[in-house]
């Protein structure tokens, strides 16, 4: 059996890459280790009658180019209406409507104005960065005339926006989110939200320089054409993944679940196929991997085919997750300020910073900050599920996750109880997924959403390593298309799309 | 981090900047004056008594040179062969046990980190000897391999016994059967490992033993050599012999990649005359991809220069005007009776363009520079070929 | 009334450097200093009989040799002495020493980890590469990237060319270096905590960031790019204390005809129609000058000395947002005998260098967590030296002056002002840490001076007691320092300039901001710069 291309991993990026390759007339085999597709985008029944999206739970950066190329809407993608973000704080809630608060409820009018000012600046900067994130980032020293023209074009565009915006961007690009939030805002809750959104999924606190980048990255996304917008998808993330899978099948992709790739076959210095865990061999002209660069190259290819400097760089690449999930099945619907959507529990920017502190030393915070969504659609009537993302939960926990799970669950429940008294009693099932659990249960390498930290030194041409920028590995015929590649994580599909186009353009020979 | 006791035991190292090797005491007793240089933090004799006489000992009798400061790594384990095959340029699967391979290794960019000798004791046991230190690199290379890498520089003493009577001296010292060793072969004489290797291009051996046995070994060889002109030598004499042979030295004839500060100063193997070590058919090795993707820009050649003034550090010109490169090592060769040099040239000079090369020599004579533009000719290396280097068994003296 | 060609507000080292260059270029220059002595934060002071203290800055490396040469500072008494040694004590009773000699250094590191001992060579090589990139930028005015003037464009092209000369790999390494934390940076090379802790301290000294904060790798470089007589990265003592530098500058200035007035604090910069015309002194006296140059930090200059209404709103906002964060304190101690550290073997040269007790990166970072919470570190990082080991001019034989730099120390204690009791408690935290490693230490103390950011601000005038006149984060470096659009030592007010460490290339006793500012002023005056020797080549 031989294929034009084998894609490893049927997460959203693998599905996108496989579909785009199949659309180009290639015969494509998509291999998924788990029993179902979706990767980080899936929905499971975690308790009898209760469905939840155990990993990603909102859609906020699905790329329009991916939606149109894969014709996802035709294949059943239904995103629904924009969801607001509600900041739950001890001083009362703030509601951000539309795309990251184009309208606010619950703040003083002067603060509302300042928020608007900051939001405009940040959205402007995010919009400037968006084109960088949508296209391939070539390796340093290998810029084509197109790359150079693009960069020159961006520089001119920026300068044409006027001196002030130009200067602001150069100053703010690598600043910390706290500086910006404190320059503009005085409301603790809004500062807390900006801080939280910037550092969720990062190994940074709001006072760490470069942390604004996380927020700009978030704001470079959006849904339904609304920058910074988000939806809690109808039918959960599994429904989103199903539309990807439908598109893949329609394009002729052969999809095989439960097919665990043990090794990538390298012959005569070229990737020529894969060997599955059961020992069977499948050959193809191209191999495209949606799993992490570390897992692909160190695990599946093996150091013998790689240069030692690259192996060293890969082995110290920060690929350990920092976010835990808490899933709750509730026998009643909690009252959460009378709102639905995404909730962020954080009192202040300093509280976010304090929650970050222990994670530096392999500890979990006593008073975690977190976001959650509540969903009633996949549950028995009158019941609900809550899915929470809790940052600053390091993969390598000093006390071990057996203890850590209990401690963190208790700390989160204590805070929820404050905002929705009695919620603890309505919990019929609770499950805390620490990064190692996300790895073992859902095949997310290192339990890291982004596969590789989205730090400033691992972005654009530096992602995941400068030798691996531009999607091509050092092995001819082996392409990387996952979140570890530019532009990075989040349910976007753009790295899968770009990587497939890079294969089609002939970069992989 | 090492245990506290081990750390504390070594606290006193700061008292002595240059460390003694197992042989330092014997050499110091012979040395007139104090001509020590620093070789990787160890005492290394520059001149013991008289560098001219020491040179002639290499070429006529037997010379002893302390090579203990050579960095030595024990590389053992089931994957040792595969590991070294990826680290080094040559095919280690073809490297037989109890033989020595001259080799070199590169970083990811295909730039030479060092050259050295690889001793194979058994299918799974090796020793890598190099002038420089490479532990972090060798450990990085071990990721994914079942292999142990332990530095044993301090534990193993090395002595180069080189010269036309060296075989006879070793036989006299009781190493019966040493005459049967072919070049690059080695043999274990009850804990004394003798390899027929060296840096002189002459008949010669290197003798390796545990450091605690070193002095007894020295005395044994020294006494056996008394009737055959045995001489303790320094690096000055050895350097002349190695130039005649055309051997290169890291940090002199090329800059080792790990230490390169200015990016264009690193060198590929084929830019320093080591292209013959490259084996692109053997499977992947470090730097392979970069070496295939790029082309050499420099070359290392032997030059024969008019006149008799050594041209160390001189600039090489083409047609007397265009800079073509630099002399990295030079001497008047007593064996060839020619003024010879090693030069690092920018291609095409040295390969495509060999004619009309000139060397600008500045010689300081009584506070005035004597400047001369001398014609230079590219000649094959080694400058001096001695049949006795390879003759087995060697002639008996 | 006399109108000076130029008035310098503040006689710190940068103000004096600017003054010297301007005076030597033929201007009639007046330096106004609020204290009764000049020197700013580079001073030698006698606070107890028989002892001279370097009571603010305490070591020297960054001060540009070009300036020492141009201003003939050796002739006026400046002498820099390089030092060797130094160590970090470990909590298990050992120590990690630092030696200049390469092999000694390697063997010392190898006591802890043979691998890391060799990795140090790679680390040092890479640090040198980064230093080589940044060094030539120190003595150049940063270009304004938003400008279309030929000068700015050509300077931008110069930067672009320098970057473009690198290989792809090196470009990547350089960009990464500028954005990484010193902890992540060191993790690339080393595995041993005490080695990382020892090297990480250069990444945090003077900043309000922890070793795990991105951007601190650059700060490390900031401490490496100096030299002592061509030995890049070396540090030394100024003989006679750090005041020797500013005293030599003042003497050089006066020798070339300049005038210094001490005890003359400036109340306000006089501005009319968007031009400065001079200054108003605290006593009400007006002094007129064609050019006014402020050595004070950017906040003090534009938020205190200038009326806000004379400045554009955007500029004022940016100045307000400029980060000057006090993060360090100082304890200066007079000792009647040499302290003993039992962990060190007899005769160890370490005592001549910088001594530390922080043996893990985590301890360093936890110290920063305390600062973020508005407290001084419970377990502070100390950079401690005894310059009298090498400098006999600061006290009598057998007695010693010990300089202890302490981090972290907040500008306010949990949001409120420092009290004397806070200061004493802070000093006690420091002394007790030293005493833990040096029995009998307290008994040797003759006198001590504890300086928190409060004292530093009150005496030297540094806002929040920040020793760099502003954080060295990327948003405040190069063309962003101090604020975008005004990185070329000029201000929105005509004839008003700034020359302190708030400007490019930043803090440390470097003198480069002062020199660069002088050059820009002379450029505006269309005067030649013959008194400037060319910046040293990096080849």
Image: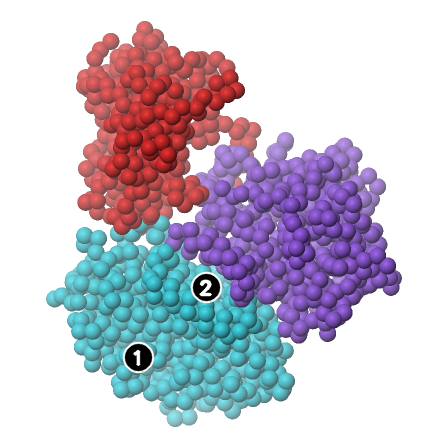
Chain colours: A cyan, B red, C purple
Q: Quadrant of the N terminus of chain C?
A: bottom right
Is residue B346 at least partly visible in the picture? yes
Camera-side residue of A67 and A164: A164
Q: Is residue C328 left or right of residue B20?
A: right
Indicate the position of residue C385 as horizontal and vertical percent values. 67, 42
Q: Is residue A406 above or below residue C496?
A: below
Indicate the position of residue A488 as horizontal and vertical percent values. 38, 68
Indicate the position of residue A284 as horizontal and vertical percent values. 17, 64
Protein chain holding label 2 = A
**Residue A1: which numbered mark, if any?**
none
Q: Is residue C202 left or right of residue A436?
A: right
Q: Where is mark 1, residue-wise? A: A241
Q: Where is mark 2, residue-wise? A: A455
Please tell me how crowded label 2 is: few (under 14), some (14-19), or many (20+) other residues with Cα within 10 Å: many
When asked about the image quadrant of residue C63, the answer is top right
Please tell me how crowded label 1 is: few (under 14), some (14-19), or many (20+) other residues with Cα within 10 Å: many
Q: Residue furthest bottom?
A: A381
User: Is disc 2 on the same chain as disc 1?
Assistant: yes
Indicate the position of residue A230 as horizontal and vertical percent values. 43, 82
Protein chain holding label 1 = A
């Amino acid at each position: 059996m031989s294929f034009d291309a084998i894609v490893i991993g049927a997460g959203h990026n693998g599905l996108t890459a496989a579909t785009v390759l199949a659309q180009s007339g290639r015969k494509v085999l998509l291999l998924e280790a788990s029993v179902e597709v979706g990767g980080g985008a899936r929905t499971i029944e975690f308790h009898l009658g209760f469905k939840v999206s155990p990993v990603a739970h909102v859609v906020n950066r699905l790329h329009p180019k991916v939606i149109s190329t894969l014709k996802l809407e035709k294949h059943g993608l239904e995103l629904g209406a924009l969801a607001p973000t509600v900041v739950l704080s001890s001083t009362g809630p703030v509601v951000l409507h539309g795309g990251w608060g184009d309208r606010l409820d619950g703040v003083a009018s002067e603060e509302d104005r300042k928020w608007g000012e900051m939001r405009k600046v940040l959205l402007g900067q995010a919009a400037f960065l968006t084109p960088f994130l949508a296209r391939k980032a070539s390796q340093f020293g290998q810029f084509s005339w197109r790359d150079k023209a693009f960069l020159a074009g961006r520089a001119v565009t920026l300068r044409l926006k006027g001196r002030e915006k130009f200067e602001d961007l150069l100053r703010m690009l690598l600043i910390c989110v706290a500086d910006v939030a404190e320059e503009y805002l005085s409301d603790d809750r809004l500062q807390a939200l900006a801080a939280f959104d910037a550092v969720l999924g990062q190994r940074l606190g709001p006072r760490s320089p470069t942390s604004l980048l996380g927020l700009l990255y978030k704001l470079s996304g959006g849904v339904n054409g609304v920058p910074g917008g988000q939806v809690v998808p109808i039918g959960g993330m599994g429904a989103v993944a199903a539309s990807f899978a439908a598109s893949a099948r329609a394009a002729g992709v052969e999809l095989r679940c439960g097919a665990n790739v043990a090794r990538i076959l390298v012959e005569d210095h070229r990737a020529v196929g894969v060997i599955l865990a059961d020992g069977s061999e499948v050959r193809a002209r191209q191999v495209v991997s949606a799993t992490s660069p570390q897992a692909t190259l160190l695990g599946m290819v093996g150091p013998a085919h790689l240069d030692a400097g690259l192996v060293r760089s890969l082995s110290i690449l920060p690929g350990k997750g920092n976010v835990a999930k808490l899933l709750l099945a509730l026998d009643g619907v909690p009252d959460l300020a009378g709102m639905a959507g995404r909730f962020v529990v954080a009192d202040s920017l300093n509280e976010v910073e304090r929650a970050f502190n222990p994670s530096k030393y392999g500890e979990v915070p006593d008073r975690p900050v977190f976001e959650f969504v509540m969903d009633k659609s996949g549950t028995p009537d009158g019941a609900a599920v809550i899915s929470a993302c809790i940052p600053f939960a390091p993969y390598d926990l000093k006390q071990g996750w057996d203890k850590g799970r209990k401690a963190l669950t208790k700390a989160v429940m204590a805070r929820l109880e404050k905002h929705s008294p009695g919620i603890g009693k309505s919990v019929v099932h609770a499950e805390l997924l620490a990064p190692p659990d996300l790895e073992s249960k859902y095949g997310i390498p290192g339990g890291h959403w982004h596969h590789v930290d989205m730090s400033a030194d691992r972005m654009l041409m530096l992602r995941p390593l400068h030798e691996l920028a531009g999607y091509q590995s050092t092995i001819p015929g082996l392409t990387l298309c996952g979140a570890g590649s530019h532009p990075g994580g989040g349910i976007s599909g753009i790295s899968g799309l770009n990587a497939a186009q890079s294969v089609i353009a002939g970069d992989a020979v | 981090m090492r245990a506290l006791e081990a750390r504390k035991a070594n606290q006193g190292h700061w008292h002595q900047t240059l460390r003694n090797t197992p042989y330092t005491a014997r050499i110091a007793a012979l040395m007139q004056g104090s001509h020590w240089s620093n070789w990787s933090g160890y005492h290394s004799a520059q001149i013991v008594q008289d560098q001219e006489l020491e040179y002639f000992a290499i070429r006529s009798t037997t010379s002893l040179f302390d090579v203990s400061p050579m960095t030595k790594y024990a590389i053992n384990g089931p994957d040792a062969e595969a590991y070294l095959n990826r680290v080094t340029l040559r095919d280690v699967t073809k490297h037989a046990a109890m033989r020595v391979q001259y080799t070199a290794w590169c970083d990811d960019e295909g730039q030479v980190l060092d050259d050295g000798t690889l001793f194979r004791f058994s299918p799974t046991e090796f020793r890598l000897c190099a002038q420089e230190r490479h532990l972090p690199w060798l450990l990085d290379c071990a990721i994914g391999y079942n292999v142990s890498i332990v530095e044993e520089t301090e534990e193993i003493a090395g002595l180069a016994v080189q010269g036309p009577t060296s075989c006879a001296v070793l036989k006299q010292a009781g190493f019966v059967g040493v005459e049967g060793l072919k070049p690059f072969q080695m043999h274990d004489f009850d804990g004394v490992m003798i390899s027929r290797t060296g840096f002189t291009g002459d008949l010669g051996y290197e003798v390796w033993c545990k450091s605690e046995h070193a002095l007894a070994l020295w005395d044994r060889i020294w006494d056996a050599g008394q009737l055959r002109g045995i001489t303790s030598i320094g690096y000055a004499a050895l350097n002349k012999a190695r130039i005649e042979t055309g051997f290169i030295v890291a940090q002199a004839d090329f800059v080792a990649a790990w230490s390169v500060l200015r990016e264009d100063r690193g060198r590929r193997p084929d830019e320093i005359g080591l292209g013959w070590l490259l084996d692109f058919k053997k499977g992947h090795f470090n730097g392979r991809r970069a070496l295939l993707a790029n082309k050499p820009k420099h070359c290392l050649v032997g030059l024969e220069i008019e006149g008799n003034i050594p041209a160390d550090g001189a600039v090489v010109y083409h047609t007397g005007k265009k800079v073509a490169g630099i002399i990295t090592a030079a001497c008047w060769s007593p064996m060839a009776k020619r003024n010879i040099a090693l030069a690092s040239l920018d291609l095409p000079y040295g390969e495509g363009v060999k004619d009309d090369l000139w060397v600008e020599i500045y010689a300081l004579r009584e506070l005035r520079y004597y400047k001369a533009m001398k014609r230079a000719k590219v000649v094959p290396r080694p400058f001096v070929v001695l049949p006795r280097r390879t003759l087995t068994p060697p002639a008996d003296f | 009334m006399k109108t000076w060609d130029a008035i310098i507000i503040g006689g710190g080292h940068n103000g004096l450097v600017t003054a010297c260059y301007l005076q030597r270029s033929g201007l009639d220059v007046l330096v106004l200093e609020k204290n009764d002595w000049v020197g700013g934060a580079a001073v030698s002071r006698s606070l107890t009989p028989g002892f001279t203290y370097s009571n603010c800055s305490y070591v020297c490396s960054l001060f540009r040799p070009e300036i020492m040469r141009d201003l003939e500072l050796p002739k006026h008494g400046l002498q820099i002495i390089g030092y060797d040694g130094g160590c970090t004590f470990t909590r298990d009773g050992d120590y990690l020493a630092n030696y200049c000699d390469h092999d000694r250094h390697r063997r010392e590191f190898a006591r802890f980890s043979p691998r890391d001992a060799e990795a140090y060579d790679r680390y040092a090589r890479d640090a040198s590469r980064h230093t080589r990139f940044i060094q030539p930028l120190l003595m150049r005015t940063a270009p304004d990237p938003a400008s279309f003037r030929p000068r700015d464009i050509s300077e931008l092209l110069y930067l672009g060319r320098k970057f473009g000369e690198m290989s792809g790999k090196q470009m990547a390494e350089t960009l990464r270096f500028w954005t990484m934390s010193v902890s992540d940076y060191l993790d690339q090379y080393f595995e041993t905590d005490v080695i990382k802790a020892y090297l990480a301290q250069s990444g945090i000294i003077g900043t309000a960031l922890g070793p795990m904060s991105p951007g601190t790798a650059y700060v490390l470089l900031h401490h490496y790019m100096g030299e002592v007589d061509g030995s890049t990265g070396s540090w030394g003592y100024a003989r006679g204390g750090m005041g020797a530098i500013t005293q030599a500058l003042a003497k050089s200035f006066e020798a070339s005809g300049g005038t210094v007035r001490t005890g003359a604090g400036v109340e306000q910069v006089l501005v009319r129609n968007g031009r400065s015309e001079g200054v108003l002194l605290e006593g009400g006296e007006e002094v007129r000058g064609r050019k006014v140059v402020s050595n004070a930090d950017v906040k003090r200059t534009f938020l205190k000395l200038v009326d806000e209404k004379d400045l554009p709103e955007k500029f004022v906002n940016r100045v307000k947002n400029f980060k000057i964060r006090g993060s360090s304190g100082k304890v200066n101690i007079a000792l009647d005998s040499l302290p003993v550290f039992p962990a060190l073997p007899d005769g160890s040269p370490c005592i001549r260098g910088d001594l530390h007790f922080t043996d893990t990166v985590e301890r360093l970072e936890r110290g920063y967590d305390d600062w973020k919470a508005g407290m001084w570190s419970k377990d502070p990082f100390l950079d401690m030296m005894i310059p009298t080991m090498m400098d006999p001019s600061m006290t009598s034989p057998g007695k010693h002056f010990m300089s202890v730099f302490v981090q972290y120390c907040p500008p306010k204690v949990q949001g409120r002002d420092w009290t004397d009791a806070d200061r004493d408690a802070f000093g006690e935290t420091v002394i007790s840490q030293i005493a833990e490693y040096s029995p009998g230490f307290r008994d040797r103390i003759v006198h001590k001076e504890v300086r928190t950011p409060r004292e530093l601000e009150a005496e030297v005038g540094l806002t929040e007691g920040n020793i760099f006149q502003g954080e060295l984060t990327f948003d405040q470096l190069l063309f962003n320092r101090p604020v975008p659009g005004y990185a070329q030592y000029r201000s929105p007010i005509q004839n008003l300039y700034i020359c302190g460490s708030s400007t490019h290339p930043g803090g440390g006793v470097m003198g480069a901001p002062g020199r660069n500012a002088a050059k820009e002023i002379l450029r505006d005056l269309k005067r030649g710069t013959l008194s400037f020797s060319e910046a040293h080549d990096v080849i």
